[in-house]
Image (tube, coloured by chain):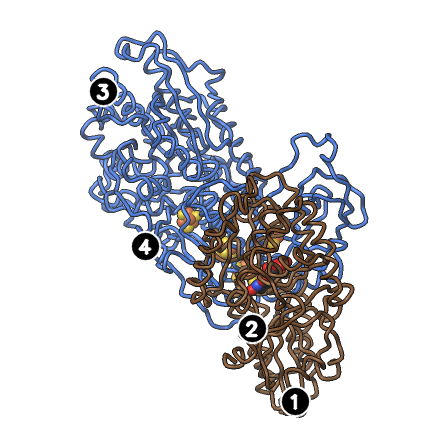
Amino acid sequence: MAKENNPRIPVSQQPFQVQKPEDTTAIGGTISIEVNEKKVSVPFGTTILEACKENQIHVPTLCHHPDLCVAGVCRICVVEVDGMRTLQTACTFPITSPIKIHTSTPMVRKARRHIIDLLLSEHYGECYSCFRNENCELQTLAKEYGVDSYTFGHITTPKFDVDRSSASVVRDMNKCILCKRCVRTCIDLQEVGCLEALDRGHETHVGTFLDKPLAEVICINCGQCINRCPTGALRANDPSDQIWNAIDDPKKHVVIQTAPSPRAAIGEEFGIEPGHSFTGELNSALKRIGFDKVFDTNYTADLTIIEEGTELLNRLKKALVDKDESVKIPQFTSCSPGWIKFIEHFYPEYLDYLSTAKSPQQMFGAITKTFYAQEAKINPADIVTVALMPCSAKKFECNRPEMDSSGFKDVDYGLTTREMAKMIKEAGIFLPEMPKSHFDDPFGDASGAGLIFGATGGVMEAALRTVYELVTGREVPFKNLNITPCRGFEGIKQASVKLENCVDAYKFLEGVEVKFIVAHGTANATKVMEMLKKGELNDVHFVEIMACPGGCLGGGGQPIPTSEEIRTKRAQAIYAEDESLELRKSHENPHVKLLYEKFLTEGPCSEKSHHLLHTHYTKRGKFIS
Amino acid sequence: MENNLDNNKKRTGPVLFSKYTRGEGIKKALAMPREDVLFELKSSGLKGRGGAGFPTSTKWMLVAASTASKKFIVCNADEGEPGTFKDRVLLMEYPELVFDGMVIAGYTIGAKTGIVYLRGEYEYLLLQLEEYLMKMRDDNLLGKNILSKEGFDFDISIRLGSGAYVCGEETALIESLEGHRGEPRNRPPYPVNTGYLGFPTVVNNVETLASVPHIMQKGGDWFRLIGTDKSTGSKLLSISGDCEKPGVYEIPWGTTITELLQFVGAQNTKAVQVGGASGICIPKRNFDRHLAYEDIATGGSIIIFNESRDMLHVLQNFMEFFVEESCGQCTPCRIGNTKLLEGVKMIRSGEFTFSYINALKDLGKSMQVASKCGLGQSSPNAFISILENFKDEIFFHNGYGRK
Ligand SMILES: Cc1cc2nc3c(=O)[nH]c(=O)nc-3n(C[C@H](O)[C@H](O)[C@H](O)COP(=O)(O)O)c2cc1C
Ligand code: SF4
Ligand code: SF4
Ligand code: SF4
Ligand code: SF4
Ligand code: FES
């Protein structure tokens, strides 16, 4: 069980789990145990927590999270195991012998109460002014265990200043219970590692390199730590007050674009089971809140495909026909701002591999304050652009200084799904009850290709639907246009399509096997980059990377909680909606065609489109930003 | 204390301070099959001297039985428990015992590498120990084919800790060796299964290892004659506090506290703290109790308090130690110790209620069972035992309870 040799991961954060046998029917494959006097049989190496869950016994947890390796630090999950002097933590204990477990003895209940009481004694914050009120694991536990009297006192002054330096993440360590889920998320799931426990004893706290403000370290703004924090210690930087002000200002024309993932998840904020889309209802709600126009980000997702697809074909042509060796292939996608900041920090020498195409959010901003302003005859200075995103990194992205190609700040505010739900509730609207309505023109139509951007593999699938057809004149050879090798939550997916009988303009691609890779979560991005470094990607043409596990539907601005199960359901909602649409290929989007006819008349990747729709990247440090 | 250490430099004792010639134990062991070494160790009944008292032969056996490609033997020389300094004496004056013990362990469990985790504050010993290791290499007591034993290669390196008490806990020690923050790991799995770099690892206290060469030389049966039935052999004690002759002594297990107090010349003794800050405080009425695994177990720290000492002050010192030395990862220890310390301060200021102090004792009991490692599990010991055993003094005679 020797640990993987990855110098960037503190090994203490890696799981020390007992391997479960592949064949549980083999001798010793399962073990008979007793849980609360009930005999059950479990696979060798199952944790007590898993065994209890299988048998409908609820054991409370705080530091445990289904996406993360075990920690065993909060101690709330303690249970009694016969013959052992101390209580054992259910989340860490692998069953390798026939033990007897008791999950609710007086000693266990008392220890759990004590732990909750201790946490509350140091927890500075009030539930009614906290965004996690009613969705807080600490609060729930205190209620479940009847811990209501601050037996060991209660802190009355804050110990830490709230860190609001980051455009994306706000850290209020006064509410932190040191479960280290954020630490494990950042290092294990994302391989960024900008959070760590600092100091020791009673002074222990979660902090950054030299306790610097988050904006000054290598945080990639992915917000994954927010999604996994059990309390209100981490939250996104919420611009909803400024947005209300803009809405209330009659001089302002407030436009909102909505990304594909929020609509597939926002229902969860209203108590709906994961896996239901509320696209039409959301449009009506946004109108009722007072947004002047509601546009679909999928429209610029289609535009991204045209620009990025053209860029790929141009690169291939330069490499294959012009034999230009300076061209970097594979081309990497650039629509995930977390991934962009990640590569800027950790692989700055590879920035030329990135597509120069802006993300759909930023393209939308640039087009809104130019083309739309011109068409609608509105002074772009009076337009306020809001982007509803599943993502906290989008907040950082819209504040990048270079994102002003319209002559103004292209996107004024990035708003997360959670913040949007809050605004909708504040406006007195119960989203699921809303009538359905359509997006506004002139960007009313978008394709299913743009929609599936929300799931990992979606950009690749959308690009293939277009590129294949441009090159061969035929649809991609997959049933119902569903390019299944792009789908699913495997960390790194690899596949290829062969280009045959190409149209004249692309004869140089005849017989080429287009190879592509799809990865999600920056831990997997690291693996891909290491492959690239070693020259193992020489025959790969296109790589899609999303910073967040699961892609945007698992973004750092999505409803809490998150787990693979929840993300799977969100993905199903997105793919189902794609399949229900008539329009499923980006290049067939009539409004995109119109844009190239009326505005970007020189076509994709032309000078004007470069100015408005493409960008450049910044080399950053490995330790501080 | 330093002076007195020199005073009893001519040490005598039944095991560790008896005569031993460098390399003898290794020679004996290498002449036996590994199983026989384990057998001899088992019949000696040797248990860990670092505090927990786990049977050493069992620990070695578990690693010896593993088929892993690499194994390690780690000597725990972190000696951080307040009031212990006996490992330092062994390393300074009897390095042959410690290192021979490690070589024998390496042979028995099949390790090629031994590591000494030396307390940061003992850095001044480093040079001398390194020189000693060089000599061993010169004499083929380390290196390839040791003492011409075909295929037995073994070497020892020394690594310095950096001053955290918790790094004496074996899994935190391993984390620290790997270059990480010194935080105890979840157990199971235990180091004998998943230790240094994920390989099976034996972690033994300096004194445990130092006992092994004697056992090899004179046999397990000889060792068992010393001490009690369940606590065989001898124990080094670091004795400090109110007495005439503090220092390091070797005693057979089973010695009573009264006997101990007599030969160190302690007078008017009120209490004896056995086992350092994480141990328990024994009041006068229990001085006839025995030092033994089955009665009062100890890693070797003995602190003597006479009638003039304020026990609440003693307790406050201990609690301040834990609040600072907790690694801070788990809730009961990180916050619990702070609350206990607060409680002590409340008693001091007279602003407390008995029901709150009882709630804290209750909390202490939860900490004992719910903390992740031995530090948090044992830190309430002093709080509970001192407040119970010196109730009258603390709450009434000293007047803390009067206000
Ligand atoms: C907080 C803490 C500190 C410890 N410090 C030491 C130490 O300084 N030296 C030591 O040998 N064992 C120490 N131990 C015990 C070790 O974890 C371990 O049990 C011991 O090294 C095993 O060796 P043994 O079997 O030879 O006793 C400590 C345990 C705890 C919980
Ligand atoms: S984090 Fe939870 S317990 Fe703390 S104030 Fe917020 S809702 Fe309440
Ligand atoms: S936002 Fe992402 S990179 Fe930043 S601290 Fe959180 S997990 Fe780490
Ligand atoms: S910030 Fe949140 S996730 Fe991180 S340790 Fe604190 S409570 Fe846990
Ligand atoms: S009991 Fe204390 S020292 Fe041990 S792991 Fe918990 S916090 Fe760290
Ligand atoms: S949930 Fe098991 S220790 Fe925290």
Q: Which of marks 1 and 3 is in front?
A: 1
The local crowd at label 3, few if under 14, some if 14 to 19, many if 20 or more residues have their Cα within 10 Å, is some
- Name the mark on residue A318: 3
Q: Which chain carries label 1?
A: B
Q: Nearer the viewer, mark 1 or mark 2?
A: 1
Residues beneath discs 1 and 3 located on the same chain: no
Residues beneath discs 2 and 3 located on the same chain: no
Q: Colour of chain B?
A: brown
Out of A504 and B392, give the one closest to the viewer: B392
Residues beneath discs 2 and 4 located on the same chain: no
**Which amino acid, by three-letter code, is at mark 4?**
Glu
Under tag 3, what secondary structure? helix
The residue that mark 2 highlights is: B82
In terms of sequence position, does the residue under pointer 3 or pointer 4 come before the other?
A: 4
Q: Where residue A261 sits: x, y (%)? A: 45, 37
Q: Residue at x 64, y 86 (%)?
A: B265
Q: Residue at x 60, y 62 (%)?
A: B20
Q: The blue chain is which one?
A: A
The residue that mark 1 highlights is: B267
Out of B114 and B12, give the one closest to the viewer: B12
